Amino acid sequence: MPNTTQSRGAARAAERTVGPWLDFDLKDQIEQLRQEPYWQSGRNSKTIAHYADFRLVMTALKANTTIQEHRTAGRLAVQILQGHVQMHAGGRDFDLPTGRILVLDQTVPYELHATEDSALLLTVAWPEED
């Protein structure tokens, strides 16, 4: 039986998300998300690095898709790889076309809206445990 993980109901081949090094082709990761059935719902994501204190999450959004208010206990970087996203965070509005990055401090609430088909890389770094 092949090694797979579930992707919101669709089987996805298991990929290594921890180790002394990880190497990704971001364009291939985006294309994979857009080929999976869940993309039809407007949004598809996958964690590509998963350590106790650090995560990388690739997200593909269809135009006019909104992610309602979120917040994380860790610091967050939102890097726009393709497309154009509008974000509301910490009481401000941010215009994020391809190539922009926004960094948010811990627990800052945010929501985002894709104004066109978009792909973004979320980097989350959690605070050290006491």
Image (tube, helix red, strand yellow):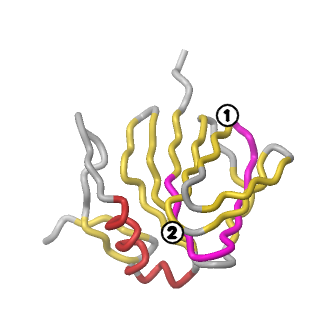
Q: Is residue 112 magenta?
A: yes
Main SS of the magenta part reads: strand
Q: Quadrant of residue 106?
A: top right
**Residue at numbered disc 2:** 60
Task: Identify whether 62 is placed above or below 70.
Answer: below
Q: Is residue 62 left or right of residue 110?
A: left
Part of the protein shown in magenta: 107-121
The three-letter code of the residue at mark 1 reads Gln
Using the numbered discs, state the Cα–Cα distance from disc 1 to disc 2 in whole angstroms: 23 Å
What element does badge 2 sit on?
strand
**Residue at numbered disc 1:** 106
Crowding around mark 2 (Cα neighbors within 10 Å: few <14, some 14 to 19, many 20+) is: many
Q: Is residue 68 magenta?
A: no
Q: Position of residue 56 (x, y in %)?
A: 44, 47
- Dot 1 or dot 2: first in sequence order is 2
Residue that sits furthest to the right in the current view:
91
Q: Position of residue 77 (x, y in %)?
A: 57, 43
What element does badge 1 sit on?
loop
